[in-house]
Amino acid sequence: MKRVFVYLLRGIVCLIMGIMALWAVTAVYYSNLPGYGLRIACIVLFLAVAAGVFWKVRPFYKLVLYFAAVWVVILVGWLCIPPSNNRNWQPDVAVLPSAQIEGNKVTVRNIRNCDYRSETDYTVSYYDKTFNLSKLQGADLFIIYWDSPLIAHTIMSFCFEDNQYLCISIETRKEAGEGYSAIKGFFKQYELIYIVGDERDLVRLRTNIRGESVYLYRLTAKPELVRQVLLDYLKSVNSLNHRPEWYNAMTQNCTTSIRGHTAPYAHGKMSWKMLINGYLDTLLYERKAIDTTLPFEQIKTASFINDRALQAGDSLDFSKWIREGLPQRY
């Protein structure tokens, strides 16, 4: 019986080491080492050393220690890869926003407002605007589906009096000619960017240009809490100008970053629905963070905004149009 347990334990350890080896190979393959050939050479060297450890080293605990030492070399090298603000960026993410806060006055610079002819054909423009925090009414959350119902993109929009909205989308900052890959998103391939934009840009791109399915939920959070969350957002907006960060598809993405901004104030427990974020709206409903006066399916149906967005087109009243008939905040 003892021998069976030992073999089972060794099997589990070998499985873990196999996963570690797979991670190391992928990390090197997607690393910033110059040249495809050099990356392949490093992978071959790592696998050769790891195979030699498995073949030659005994007893088993020494095998594990030697393998861990080799793997740590890869890990340390990967951790030392620095993010940068100085790359050949795509035009729509080339300029970083910033915010100046003076009491209740917040001046946001470089609010993006692209004029789209197609997803890849657009004219980038920016404007600056001053918002009065005393006129902050609440926040809305956009949940956007483009393929699988399990995964979505989320955008937060902060709502002020007189139909003024400050929309912030947390995204990958892609270089010219670079596309998005979910696998690369785990391996330091994209810097993080907070795009502060006009809803006619950030939302209309998804509804009218890409044809993605967009739902808009009016959050029930009080203005006092929303103010704290917005200031926390703007702190990160300013920080990225001086200290770039890596995007990570698991830990530093559009939804987990929102969690990071709201957690100190909302005190909600972490949920698997924040990772499989296609179900985020059901979590909001369960926690009464959105209207719960009707069954969830009715709320979701009423929150679908694509038809209204298409009717609004590029109207200056786009934000007002897409909120017509939405479930209310309170």
Image (cartoon, rainbow, N blue to C red):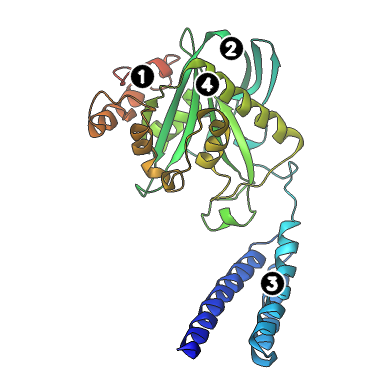
- Return the residue at label 3: 71
Residue 102 vs residue 11: left or right? right
Residue type at tag 4: Val
Number of the label disc, if any, that sits on residue 226: 4
Cα distance between the residues tagged 2 and 3? 50 Å
- Return the residue at label 1: 323
Cα distance between the residues tagged 2 and 4? 10 Å
Cα distance between the residues tagged 1 and 4? 19 Å
Q: Nearer the viewer, residue 17 or 93?
A: 17
Mark 1 packing: few (<14 Cα in 10 Å), some, or many (20+)? Answer: some
Asked if residue 187 shows in the view, the reply is: yes
Give the image location of residue 15, x and y in percent. 52, 76
Q: Nearer the viewer, residue 17 or 96?
A: 17
Badge nearest the viewer, 1 or 3: 3
Residue type at tag 1: Arg
Give the image location of residue 171, x and y in percent. 56, 40
Cα distance between the residues tagged 1 and 3? 52 Å
Mark 2 packing: few (<14 Cα in 10 Å), some, or many (20+)? Answer: many
Give the image location of residue 101, x and y in percent. 69, 16
- Pointer 2 and pointer 4: residues touching (CB < 8 Å)? no
314 versus 263 height, above or below: above
Asked if residue 90 shows in the view, the reply is: no
263 versus 78 height, above or below: above
Sequence-first disc among 3 and 4:
3
Q: How many labels, in total?
A: 4
Q: Residue at x 73, y 33 (%)?
A: 241
Cα distance between the residues tagged 3 and 4? 44 Å
Residue 295's quadrant in the figure? Answer: top left
Mark 4 packing: few (<14 Cα in 10 Å), some, or many (20+)? Answer: many
Number of the label disc, if any, that sits on residue 133: 2
Sequence-first disc among 1 and 3:
3
